[in-house]
Structure formats: C-alpha cells, structure tokens
Amino acid sequence: MKRHSHFLLVSASLWLGAGMPATAAGAVKPNVLLLFADQHNADVMGCAGHSIVKTPHLDQLAAQGVRFTRAYCQDAICVPSRTSLMTGLYPRTTGCLDNGEAPVSQTKLYPLQHVLQSAGYLIGCFGKRHLPRPTLALGWNRSATVIAPNQDPSDENYQDWIQTRGPGQAEAFEKDHKGHLQSDMGCHISEVKPENRIEAYTALKTKDFLRDCQKQGKNFFCSTSFHGPHQPYTPPAKWAALYPVEKMPLPASVNEPIDHLPPGLQNWRRNTKTPWSLAKAAENPTLYRQYIAYYFAQVTEVDHFIGDVLAELAALGLRDNTIVIYASDHGDFVARHGMIEKCALSHNVYEETLRVPLIISWPKRFQQGATCNSLAELVDLYPTLVELLGLQRPADAPKLAGRSLVPTLAEGKPTGRAYAVSENWSQTTVITDRYKLGTWIDPTPRYAQRDFRQKFPDLLFDRVNDPEELFNLSGKPDYAAVEAQLRAHLAEWVGRTADDGKKALSASTAETKNKNQKSNQ
C-alpha cells in the first residue's frame, strides 16, 4: 500500500513545487498534532462543565490552550465534515454532502496534507480517516487504518495487527452485525481487552510515528483519528464501571413531543425494532440510561488514549514546539430530543450534532486556560495553520472559506463571525450568537421510498430562552424581524460561497440516473 503515499508525495510536489519553504525565513517550524474523535458531543467533557464524565487529559489540554465553546461542523455527517476540515471549504463547494459522495474534481481542492507534505512535513495518519477516495484519502508518508483497508488505503491496518493478539474489535463488529448490535440501542459490554481495541491501536501507531519523526529530526503533521465515541456503544467493562447505568440522569428533552421533530426523527422515535428501538426506550428509560452510560464510557476511553499520545509527545521533548488540536467531525444526541447517535439522514440543525469540541494548544505562542465564546467553524482550522506555518497554496487553489483563529489564540480577540453555517443535502442552518435557523432542502430521509415534496416547517430557535431547542419560532410574528435577519445572512452566504461542487455532483447524479433509465428501457 505504500505506493499510494509515494504517488501523492510526487503529485503534491508537482502541484506546489518541491522544497518550498514552510515558514518565513528564519522561523522555527512547529509540528502539528490533530487529535480527532468521531461523534463527540461538545458538552461531554469535564472542561466543558460536565458534572459526570471524566476527561482528565482533554481537561489538561484545555488548561494549556484555548477551548472554543461555539465551534460548529460544516455537516453533521462524517465524510462531508472531514472533507470540509481538510480542504477548508464548505460542502457545497467540495460537492461532498453525504457519506457516499466524493468531490468530482478532487485534485483541484488541495487538501491540507498535500500542502504540508510539499512544504517538507512528514505526514502521518492513524485511525479512522474516512475521507473520499482516491485523492483526498491519500497523501500520507505513513498511515494505518482501523476500518476496512479498501475504505482507507493505508500502509498498515488493524485487521492484520489483531490477528497475532487474539480476539479484536473487528471480530466484535461482526458479532454486532449478526447479533449483538440487534440489542436495544446497540449497547453491550465489549469482551475485547482494552489494549486490543482500535483506540489502543490508533495510539500505538501514532506514538511509533512520533518517535520516528523525533529520530529523523523532521517536522510532522500527524492526524490521529479515534473511532469513538461513535456507535455501536460497546465500551470495555473497565470504563463502563465508571458510569453506573442506574445513576445516569436523563436530559430534559428526552420526552419531547414527537410532532416537534422533523419527519425522519419522528420515524426513529416511533421505531420499536433494534438497534435504535427508541419507542421501547420511551417505555423503559433504563435503555436510555444505558446508552448514555456507555457513550460516556467511550468518551473516557478516547480521553485515556489521548493522554497516552500526549505523554509520548512530552517524553520525546516535542510538546513545546507542537500545535495540538482536538476536535470532532460532529456530535451525538446523547438522548436529547429522545434521539440516539446523530440520525444523519433527516436533519442538520440540532446543537447536539452540529456543535463540536475544539481545543487548540501551543504553550509557547497561545493563551493558556482560555475560552472563546464567539462563533467558530471547522473550516477555520486550515487558514489558521496556513498563517501559523507560513504555508503557500497554489495560485489556482480555491479561496479558503474559513478565517484564521490566530488573533483569538494569541491575543484573546473574538473570532469576528456574525454567523456560522452548516449544510448537508437535507438542511442548511445559519447560527448567530443567540438564534439558529434551519432551512429545509428536503426534510425526508434521503433513501426513503416516499414523496420528497413532503413539507415540514423551517426551524427557528432562540438559544437563550430555549437552550434545549424545543419550541420552533419560525413564522411567529414576534420573531419575524429575527427570522428575516437570519434569512438575509443565509442569502449573503449563498451569494459568496461557490457551489461548483454541488452543481457538478447534481449533474453527475442526473447523468447516472439517465443512463440507468435508458438501460432499463
């Protein structure tokens, strides 16, 4: 598989020019360690004020840097969100708005790893990458995946590694598919030893890479992407024991009236079949409590291995010159609105799934123990690193959508955003300091056999008076001016945001449908 890394190294050099300086003359280049989780609710951290969950290592990282309390993903689905982060572009620009979609013109997006590689950085990627193939998924000097190797082309993979160590999580996933995942809420205690789980493998491969970079005296960009706390909710007993099921509190919105919710979420709430048996959970709240407990346990597991990686970074003497970023691609409902995981097929509006944890730390340059309460987006990470590392992008590269967070990190200044935007194929949402408006593109589940013209009202929430987002204010006379302002923000964003990728994707989809129709005639 190493041929993939070599191919992208050559390609990136051709695009950007081999040997390009990475920083201004005389500056010492910092390393970058991107620690990433899948589906981490931003509230579920000790440093975010959570009274139950244990995240000592993330808490320490926040104490050494800046925590953004209002950071939003660009799409509450894995692949589009990760694509936006690595390209610095919105989903409508990349053309990736759902997990099964890939940008039509990937080579023109110049993802972050390619630019850094051409600037002389060693590039490592370990864990769950989950980026579109072929181009965006590649470009690493060293890589290891925890999901199917054909999804994440890599030098090494968890499936091969675990063969010599006994039963592993890959086997556990098979058991889930055949039986265990059919348990209510997809919850059970994993029998896999903690040291054999995919999070342990991700940390192990990351530490190996850090040691190699230190020996070679090379600057690095390392993307370490943990699978947890994504479903299935199957923590080892070691971490589940920290969260007794019977002591887990239920959120205030767990019994929100079903008719408040979009059609797809209504269907989930009425579901009696496993694994997402939410109708059963409404009758038996212990099922909700178990899901919450196991989700917390998986957050603590991820935190444990983050601490493992950070301890290695410090032991190697690399911490002071390494920018450490922690983020997630999207959140998890954690039983709010009576929902489980993120129900990606039928909304892109709720705070639990759009708002993500974001911590950035570089002790020698940034504030420590600070919080930023102004709006930020994941697309801001790319321009932030461009400024900090003095990176140069090709002349034909699309304009980055985000804004640099350096003034916030170094001086505590507000980010300056009047609003943030998140969009998938179903819903575009604009968010201000106080209000949020979700406008429908299509409120029905994308792959459902039903009338896609079914109407459901747009969703307007007052986050100050209604932080649980229970009461839709769209169309209410008292909020007409507020709604008009948010629609004006959205129109301004649409007007300045390229949608070439979305148009190309639509054209490609239409062409495929036409071909299929003709072949069936």
Image (cartoon, helix red, strand yellow):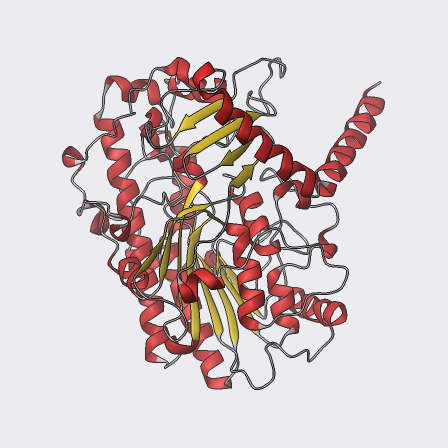
Is residue 392 shown to the viewer in this render?
yes
Percent position (x, y) of residue 509? 74, 32
Query: At 57% from the left edge and 86% from the top edge, which residue is drawn?
Result: 26
Percent position (x, y) of residue 431? 48, 36
Q: Quadrant of residue 340?
A: top left
Percent position (x, y) of residue 279? 33, 18
Q: Quadrant of residue 116?
A: bottom right
Horizontal placement of 365 versus 24: left or right?
left
**Which quarter of the rendering shows the N terminus?**
bottom right
In-front residue for pair 241/408: 408
Percent position (x, y) of residue 399? 68, 55
Is residue 164 shown to the viewer in this render?
no
* Vertical comparison of 286 with 377: above or below: above
Q: Quadrant of residue 225?
A: bottom left
* Vertical comparison of 194 with 103: above or below: below
**Which quarter of the rendering shows the C terminus?**
top right
* Vertical comparison of 326 with 14: above or below: above
Query: At 27% from the left edge and 41% from the top edge, which residue is drawn?
Result: 294
Query: At 56% from the left edge and 55% from the top edge, which residue is drawn?
Result: 403
Query: At 34% from the left edge and 61% from the top edge, which residue is drawn?
Result: 306
